[in-house]
Image (cartoon, grey):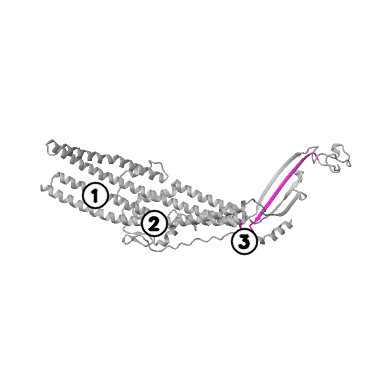
Amino acid sequence: MKTPFKFLLLCTPLLFKSCAVGPDYCAPENFVGETWVSPSEETAVTMETPLSQWWEVFEDPLLTKYLALACEYNYDVLTATSNIFQARAMRQVAASSFYPQIGADVNATKTYFSKNGPVFAIGPSTGSNPGTISSNTGLSFAAQIPQIQNLFNALFDFTWEIDLFGKTRRSVEAADAVIGSAIENRNDVLITVMAEIARNYMELRSFQKRTVLIEENVILLEKKSALIHRQYETGYVSLLDRETIDAELATERAKLPDIQAQIYRNIYILSTLVGSQPEALLEELLPSQPLPKVPAHVAVGLKSDLLRRRPDVRRAERDLAEATANIGVAVASFFPSITLIGDGGLQSLALSKLFSWNSRTWAYGGDILTPVFQGGRLRGNWKAECARADAALHTYRQTVLNALEEAESTLIAYTQSLKTGNERLRATEHYGEVVNLSQARNRNGLVSLLSLLDAERQFNSAQQSQLDSEIATLLNLVALYKALGGSCSETCLIDPQNP
């Protein structure tokens, strides 16, 4: 029994002298400058490292609560997390080829042999003399073989394919890259879900505020309509004036149902994004709350750090690593595969003697399988993996360009929306002063009530325009944080270095 172990011991050095064929992976270099192309003279934008928990700048407890719920209960995030566990399990499957495969088999059979077959009942039980020659086989009836035979086995089998050319190592390398890609995909999904929650939450608050402004405008139009109706009755204005103000009033009232539908739609979306029924957050979100404030300073970091923070770029890089490793797997298929085989255990015709020393049996050996002619299959597979790696490289480079373009675009959109918001804020302040002056002049009889109502409506319109700028700035800020990709330490994200 010592002989098989000596044989395995002699073959073991092959494992340490083997090499991994195919290209060794090297991550592509990217030469990205540290400064942003987009104008960033705004003092609100700094080059400090972006916040990990970027939503905290809005100082909104409900928004923070929903983002935490999404980390735990959003089904897209949970699906992506399950894909990570699947990738880890498949890596374990790939790595199992490093080790011997040992199986145990315990079986028993009862066989009835044909009298006209190669094995049949002979000897005294058939009445034949021991020296008689069988007409079927030409063999002498010298041995007695029962026609009905029992056989009991308790065996272990052993196979071990030596990874001489690195096929298994390349497969494990590819599996590690798949795990990294799955992790980054989950991070990307999570950031997308977070941005979607923030966007819908801010739209909800903007619709609630717009509802208040439109209702105020409706009240102003109703006052103006009542005034013009009295003037029409006295002949001071024409029918055209009366119909015009009634049309304006109806138009303004028509905006409210659509906005109400948008409010409910945003609440339903937020509920599903946190993994709940659409109506789950109605009671909590229907009461109107103010819009989150735009932070005084937004840290965007250095442009050169962008690619390190973006999960989609990191995922594309891991996909490239997987494709490169699979080239090695394809190349290794051209070389011989060496497998050590062996089995041993107990075998007996009688169950009572199965566990006796004389029932032992064993065998060992080796197998070298070399591809000779495959009809171009191996070469075609190698070409396919090379083309796949080229495609992965192109995808990676395009992902890098898309990341740079998205970050630059959202940065310029945010900084310019700040400027627009500042101008509209000044316009609103001026219209507010116009209202104050008109009220004072109206009290002194210098301005008519109709002129005062028009001034108040202009102020209301300016407030709605300012609201448009505020929500645009907030949405651009959310898009900017999403484009920046967060950081590896972001809450709920999985760190590829410590999965």
Pointers 1 and 2 in contact (C-beta within 8 Å)? no
Q: Could you tell me residue 103's position as x and y percent?
A: 66, 49
Query: Badge 1 local density, few (<14 within 10 Å), some, or many (20+)?
Result: many
**Magenta stretch, overall SS:** strand
Q: Is residue 158 magenta?
A: yes
Q: Residue at x 30, y 52 (%)?
A: 470
- Judge from the rendering whether residue 130 lies leftward or rightward of residue 29; answer left or right: right
Q: CA distance from mark 1 to mark 2?
A: 31 Å
Q: Which amino acid does the dot numbered 1 rest on?
A: Ala
Pointers 2 and 3 in contact (C-beta within 8 Å)? no
- For residue 258, say whether it is visible: yes
Q: Which residue is mark 1?
A: 462
Quadrant of the drawing holding the N terminus: bottom right
Residue lying furthest top in this view? 233
Q: Which residue is mark 2?
A: 407
- For residue 322, say whether it is visible: no
- Judge from the rendering whether residue 415 lies leftward or rightward of residue 230; answer left or right: right
Q: Could you tell me residue 357's position as x and y percent?
A: 76, 50
Q: Which residue range is magenta in the image? A: 146-167
Q: Residue at x 77, y 43 (%)?
A: 350
Query: Badge 3 local density, few (<14 within 10 Å), some, or many (20+)?
Result: some
Q: Which amino acid does the dot numbered 2 rest on?
A: Ala
**Mark with earlier residue (2, 3):** 3
Q: Could you tell me residue 327's position as x and y percent?
A: 57, 56
Q: Which residue is mark 3?
A: 19
**Residue in the foreground of this view, choosing between 44 and 414:** 414
**Mark with earlier residue (3, 1):** 3
Q: Could you tell me residue 359's position as x and y percent?
A: 76, 49
Q: Residue at x 27, y 51 (%)?
A: 466
SS assignment at label 1: helix
